[in-house]
Amino acid sequence: MKQTGRDDFNENVKDLLAKRVGMKCSNPNCRRPTSGPQTLTKATINIGVAAHVTAASPGGPRFDPTLSPEERSSETNGIWLCQNCAKLVDNDDTRYTVAILHHWKQLSEEAVLLEIESPIQAPRPESPTDIDLIRFYSQCFDRPAFQDYFHQEGSMEDFDRAMADTIIAINTGCLRSRDGAVLSQLKGKSFLQDATWCLSMDTVVDLLRAVRSRYAEAIRSKEIHIHKNKDSTFYCIHNPEVALWMDETRSQILLMFGEVCDKAGIPRPAFPHRIPRPFRAF
């Protein structure tokens, strides 16, 4: 029964949130299953929680007074988490913002869809070593978005998609091509046993998210203008500092990942070793 003063989810919404992420925690650094069998053959156990992105009542974490009760109790304001992660995000709402929780939700839903769409592949190691995982992550950077200077990028949308796909691959262990085809699957960075390597990969993902955020801001502020017609797409970089920042940040990402590769004894991914000189804005 719904508590007075709280805009709780009904059972249909809870069921929807859980199933859209395959009954797994939506925290990309967790992804633990939340449902399984009890000892009794006809019973199951659930450790999942349909958590509110913005709180169900005033005074709760991230409460948004502008939402209606219907919006507050809808699927769009929910995220499926294990009990540990639900407690974590509610105890530190400064760190775990609305934007981060929505991003977790998107990543987890995309990861489950990829698993469903994936063709049958060659058997994967059940317990991959840290070196196996780093070798897998290295494949994520073997694409033009990490090899070409930003002002030479043929498609800005493809560049942004490549950043998103790389984040998903490192977080969830599912690597796909630009057209959405699954190229390889293993496990996400939370399975790394070496704490130093895990921390480095956390930083790599944070920087990749910063690249996406800077790109989105450049589009909003018209520092990058994209013009489409029925035959082609054109783009203009009005602020050359954006392109230089993109090149420097991607170089920083690959240098950091390269240090992990060195420790793992595998080749570093190729990338431009020289940041280009400023070019004239179009």
Image (tube, rainbow, N blue to C red):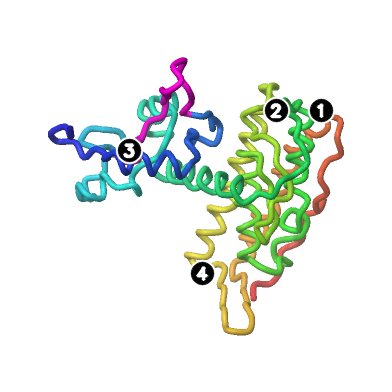
Q: Residue at x 59, y 47 (%)?
A: 116
Quarter of the image where the C terminus is located: bottom right
Residue extending furthest toward the left: 4
Disc 1 from disc 3: Cα separation = 41 Å
Label located before the other in sequence (1 or 4):
4
Query: Which residue position holds label 3?
Result: 52
Depth check, mark 4 against mark 2: the one in front is 2
| Foreground residue among 275 and 144 | 144
Query: Which residue position holds label 4?
Result: 222
* Image disc number at residue 263: 1
Q: Amino acid at mark 1?
A: Lys
Image x and y of residue 227, in percent: 56, 78
Q: Amino acid at mark 2?
A: Trp
Depth check, mark 1 against mark 4: the one in front is 1
Residue 156 on the magenta span = no
Depth check, mark 1 against mark 3: the one in front is 3
Label located before the other in sequence (4 or 2):
2
Residue 47 on the magenta span = yes
Disc 3 from disc 2: Cα separation = 32 Å
Q: Report whether 161 appears left or right of 46.
A: right
